[in-house]
Image (cartoon, rainbow, N blue to C red):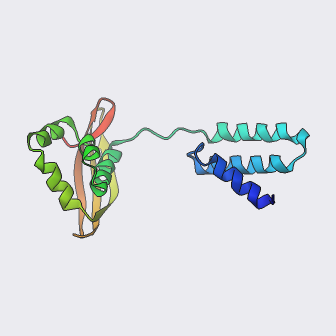
Protein backbone atom coordinates (compact mmCIF):
# COMPACT_ATOMS: atom_id res chain seq x y z
CA UNK A 1 0.00 0.00 0.00
CA UNK A 2 1.45 3.35 -1.02
CA UNK A 3 1.95 6.35 1.24
CA UNK A 4 -0.85 8.31 -0.42
CA UNK A 5 -3.30 5.42 0.00
CA UNK A 6 -2.44 5.15 3.72
CA UNK A 7 -3.01 8.89 4.05
CA UNK A 8 -6.45 8.68 2.36
CA UNK A 9 -7.48 5.66 4.46
CA UNK A 10 -6.59 7.51 7.66
CA UNK A 11 -8.43 10.62 6.52
CA UNK A 12 -11.60 8.62 5.75
CA UNK A 13 -11.31 6.72 9.01
CA UNK A 14 -11.21 9.95 11.04
CA UNK A 15 -13.91 11.79 9.06
CA UNK A 16 -16.81 11.12 11.49
CA UNK A 17 -14.72 11.64 14.63
CA UNK A 18 -13.53 15.22 14.18
CA UNK A 19 -15.79 18.16 13.37
CA UNK A 20 -12.89 20.62 13.29
CA UNK A 21 -11.25 20.20 9.87
CA UNK A 22 -7.85 21.49 11.04
CA UNK A 23 -7.84 19.09 13.96
CA UNK A 24 -8.81 16.20 11.68
CA UNK A 25 -6.06 17.05 9.23
CA UNK A 26 -3.50 17.29 12.02
CA UNK A 27 -4.59 13.91 13.37
CA UNK A 28 -4.29 12.38 9.90
CA UNK A 29 -0.79 13.76 9.47
CA UNK A 30 0.34 12.50 12.87
CA UNK A 31 -1.11 9.04 12.26
CA UNK A 32 0.40 8.99 8.78
CA UNK A 33 3.81 9.84 10.18
CA UNK A 34 3.37 7.20 12.86
CA UNK A 35 2.66 4.57 10.21
CA UNK A 36 5.95 5.49 8.53
CA UNK A 37 8.00 5.70 11.77
CA UNK A 38 9.92 3.14 13.68
CA UNK A 39 7.99 1.56 16.60
CA UNK A 40 10.10 3.51 19.11
CA UNK A 41 8.77 6.77 17.68
CA UNK A 42 5.07 5.84 17.98
CA UNK A 43 4.80 7.16 21.56
CA UNK A 44 6.05 10.52 20.36
CA UNK A 45 3.44 10.52 17.58
CA UNK A 46 0.60 9.80 20.03
CA UNK A 47 1.90 12.54 22.34
CA UNK A 48 1.85 14.98 19.41
CA UNK A 49 -1.71 13.93 18.54
CA UNK A 50 -2.84 14.42 22.15
CA UNK A 51 -1.23 17.85 22.21
CA UNK A 52 -3.00 18.81 18.98
CA UNK A 53 -6.36 17.62 20.31
CA UNK A 54 -5.97 19.64 23.49
CA UNK A 55 -4.82 22.79 21.70
CA UNK A 56 -7.49 22.62 18.97
CA UNK A 57 -10.34 21.51 21.20
CA UNK A 58 -11.80 24.96 21.73
CA UNK A 59 -15.54 24.92 22.04
CA UNK A 60 -17.61 27.08 19.75
CA UNK A 61 -19.08 30.22 21.29
CA UNK A 62 -22.74 29.92 22.30
CA UNK A 63 -25.26 31.08 19.70
CA UNK A 64 -25.97 34.79 19.91
CA UNK A 65 -28.89 36.98 18.90
CA UNK A 66 -27.79 37.14 15.25
CA UNK A 67 -27.85 33.33 15.10
CA UNK A 68 -31.57 33.39 15.90
CA UNK A 69 -32.21 35.57 12.84
CA UNK A 70 -30.00 33.35 10.68
CA UNK A 71 -31.81 30.22 11.95
CA UNK A 72 -35.15 31.69 10.88
CA UNK A 73 -33.97 32.33 7.33
CA UNK A 74 -32.23 28.95 7.16
CA UNK A 75 -35.51 27.25 8.11
CA UNK A 76 -37.40 29.26 5.50
CA UNK A 77 -34.91 28.27 2.79
CA UNK A 78 -35.10 24.62 3.81
CA UNK A 79 -38.91 24.74 3.89
CA UNK A 80 -38.70 23.35 7.44
CA UNK A 81 -41.83 24.45 9.30
CA UNK A 82 -40.74 22.88 12.61
CA UNK A 83 -37.36 24.66 12.56
CA UNK A 84 -39.03 27.91 11.51
CA UNK A 85 -41.49 27.83 14.41
CA UNK A 86 -38.74 26.70 16.81
CA UNK A 87 -36.66 29.77 15.85
CA UNK A 88 -39.46 32.11 16.97
CA UNK A 89 -40.22 33.55 20.37
CA UNK A 90 -43.15 32.21 22.36
CA UNK A 91 -45.28 35.25 21.47
CA UNK A 92 -44.74 34.61 17.76
CA UNK A 93 -45.32 30.86 18.14
CA UNK A 94 -48.62 31.60 19.89
CA UNK A 95 -49.58 33.94 17.08
CA UNK A 96 -48.87 31.29 14.43
CA UNK A 97 -50.63 28.56 16.41
CA UNK A 98 -53.89 30.55 16.19
CA UNK A 99 -53.79 30.29 12.40
CA UNK A 100 -51.73 27.31 11.24
CA UNK A 101 -52.10 28.26 7.56
CA UNK A 102 -49.85 31.31 8.13
CA UNK A 103 -46.74 29.12 8.39
CA UNK A 104 -47.67 27.31 5.18
CA UNK A 105 -48.23 30.64 3.44
CA UNK A 106 -44.83 31.96 4.52
CA UNK A 107 -43.08 28.76 3.47
CA UNK A 108 -44.76 28.73 0.07
CA UNK A 109 -43.72 32.37 -0.40
CA UNK A 110 -40.09 31.40 0.35
CA UNK A 111 -40.05 28.28 -1.82
CA UNK A 112 -37.23 28.51 -4.36
CA UNK A 113 -35.65 31.54 -2.71
CA UNK A 114 -32.28 31.88 -1.00
CA UNK A 115 -31.58 34.49 1.67
CA UNK A 116 -28.22 36.10 2.18
CA UNK A 117 -28.19 37.85 5.54
CA UNK A 118 -25.41 40.27 6.40
CA UNK A 119 -25.52 41.23 10.07
CA UNK A 120 -24.64 44.89 10.51
CA UNK A 121 -24.94 45.26 14.27
CA UNK A 122 -26.27 43.67 17.43
CA UNK A 123 -27.37 45.68 20.45
CA UNK A 124 -28.31 43.53 23.40
CA UNK A 125 -28.99 43.51 27.09
CA UNK A 126 -29.59 40.49 29.31
CA UNK A 127 -32.78 39.20 27.72
CA UNK A 128 -33.49 41.19 24.55
CA UNK A 129 -31.51 42.28 21.53
CA UNK A 130 -31.93 44.18 18.30
CA UNK A 131 -30.19 42.75 15.25
CA UNK A 132 -29.75 45.07 12.27
CA UNK A 133 -29.08 43.31 8.99
CA UNK A 134 -29.18 43.57 5.21
CA UNK A 135 -31.21 40.95 3.36
CA UNK A 136 -30.61 39.89 -0.23
CA UNK A 137 -33.01 37.30 -1.62
CA UNK A 138 -32.14 35.42 -4.79
CA UNK A 139 -34.19 32.83 -6.59
CA UNK A 140 -37.82 32.89 -7.60
CA UNK A 141 -38.59 36.37 -6.20
CA UNK A 142 -35.30 38.29 -5.90
CA UNK A 143 -35.18 41.46 -3.84
CA UNK A 144 -32.93 43.32 -1.48
CA UNK A 145 -33.56 45.26 1.71
CA UNK A 146 -31.10 47.25 3.78
CA UNK A 147 -30.99 48.00 7.48
CA UNK A 148 -33.76 45.68 8.62
CA UNK A 149 -34.23 45.26 12.37
CA UNK A 150 -35.15 42.06 14.15
CA UNK A 151 -36.11 42.00 17.79
CA UNK A 152 -34.75 38.93 19.53
CA UNK A 153 -35.53 37.59 22.99
CA UNK A 154 -33.76 35.16 25.32
CA UNK A 155 -36.09 32.29 26.23
CA UNK A 156 -35.00 29.25 28.22
CA UNK A 157 -31.35 30.00 27.53
CA UNK A 158 -31.78 30.40 23.76
CA UNK A 159 -32.20 33.46 21.56
CA UNK A 160 -35.52 33.46 19.71
CA UNK A 161 -36.61 35.69 16.84
CA UNK A 162 -39.43 38.17 17.40
CA UNK A 163 -41.24 39.71 20.33
Q: Is residue 1 above or below residue 142?
A: above
Give residue 95's position: percent from left, percent from top: 11, 40
Residue drawn at point x = 83 percent, y = 36 percent: 43
Depth check, front residue: 122 or 95? 95
Residue drawn at point x = 30 percent, y = 57 percent: 77
Query: Is 18 left, or right, of 40 in this rendering?
Result: left
The residue furthest left is: 98
Give residue 34's position: percent from left, percent from top: 81, 46
Q: Is residue 72 above or below residue 108?
A: above
Quadrant of the image for the C terminus? Answer: top left
Give residue 12's position: percent from left, percent from top: 64, 52
Give residue 8's position: percent from left, percent from top: 70, 57
Quadrant of the image for the N terminus? Answer: bottom right
Query: Is 156 left, or right, of 32 in this rendering?
Result: left
Query: Is 33 left, or right, of 86 in this rendering?
Result: right
Depth check, front residue: 49 or 7? 7
Query: Can you tell which quarter of the image residue 137 is in?
Result: bottom left
Q: How many marks?
A: 0
Residue drawn at point x = 32 percent, y = 43 percent: 65
Query: Is 123 left, or right, of 109 in this rendering?
Result: right
The residue furthest front is: 1
Residue drawn at point x = 31 percent, y = 55 percent: 78
Amino acid sequence: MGSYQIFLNLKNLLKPRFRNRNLKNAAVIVLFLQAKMKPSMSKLAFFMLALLIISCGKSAPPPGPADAVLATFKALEAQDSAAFVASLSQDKRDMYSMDSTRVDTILSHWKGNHAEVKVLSVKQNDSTAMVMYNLTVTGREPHSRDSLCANVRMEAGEWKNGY
